Amino acid sequence: MPGDLRIRGSVVVPEAELSWRFSRSSGPGGQGVNTTDSRVELSLDVAATSALSPYLRERALANLGDRLVDGVLTVSAAEQRSQWQNRLSAERKLADALAAAIAPPARPRVPTKPSASARRRRVDDKKRRGTIKKLRRGDPD
């Protein structure tokens, strides 16, 4: 599976489901800037991929809702001058986005109350500060 994209654990996207597109990148590049297609766009049809179980697919579609166009997630990379490096960067971006989308939700915070000794320490500290401030005032004659 050299061309397959590992997301996490057992989730692996087959190479056949990835769609690549190359174009000219803006920015620095020297003499070859107008002749090399170094910008990379990598797309994955999340709604139809076989890499995700129905449960994970629903979670991904819900979490990626604003980034999807007709169920397709597209990432682009044009940071490097080399197409190969941009391809690696696009794969990394797609894998990170998909891994974050299928990650289980965080456990809800369980509210706790301060212990009796913590409340007592807090009141004692407040009294101590009040006493210090009272001693600063001096005698009201």
Image: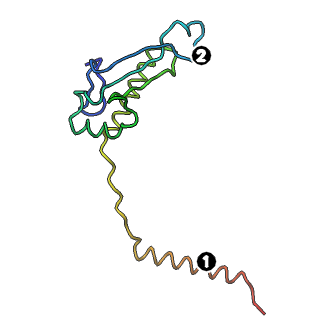
**Of marks 2 and 1, the one in the foreground:** 2
Disc 2 to disc 1: CB gap under 8 Å = no
Q: Nearer the viewer, residue 85 or 94?
A: 94
Q: Residue at x 50, y 20 (%)?
A: 78
Residue kind at label 1, given as amino acid type: Arg
Indicate the quadrant containing the C terminus: top left, top right, bottom left or bottom right.
Answer: bottom right
**From the viewer's perspective, is 94 left or right of 80?**
left
| Quarter of the view holding residue 75 | top left
Q: Which residue is mark 2?
A: 28
Residue most extreme to the front: 70
Q: Nearer the viewer, residue 81 or 131?
A: 81
Residue 32, position as x, y percentages in the image: 55, 7
Indicate the quadrant containing the N terminus: top left, top right, bottom left or bottom right.
Answer: top left
Q: Residue at x 32, y 47 (%)?
A: 105
Q: Badge 2, how many Cα within 10 Å: few under 14, some, many 20+?
A: few
Q: Badge 1, how many Cα within 10 Å: few under 14, some, many 20+?
A: few
State the separation of the CA atoms marked 2 and 1: 62 Å
Residue most extreme to the bottom: 141
Q: Nearer the viewer, residue 6 or 36?
A: 36
Q: Element under label 1?
A: helix
Give the mark nearest the N terminus, 2 or 1.
2
Q: Residue at x 63, y 82 (%)?
A: 131
Residue 76, position as x, y percentages in the image: 44, 23
Q: Which residue is mark 1?
A: 129
| Quarter of the view holding residue 63 | top left
Residue 69, position as x, y percentages in the image: 37, 29
Residue kind at label 2, given as amino acid type: Pro
| Quarter of the view holding residue 140 | bottom right
Residue most extreme to the right: 141
The way the protein has been coloured in the rendering is rainbow
Q: Element under label 2?
A: loop
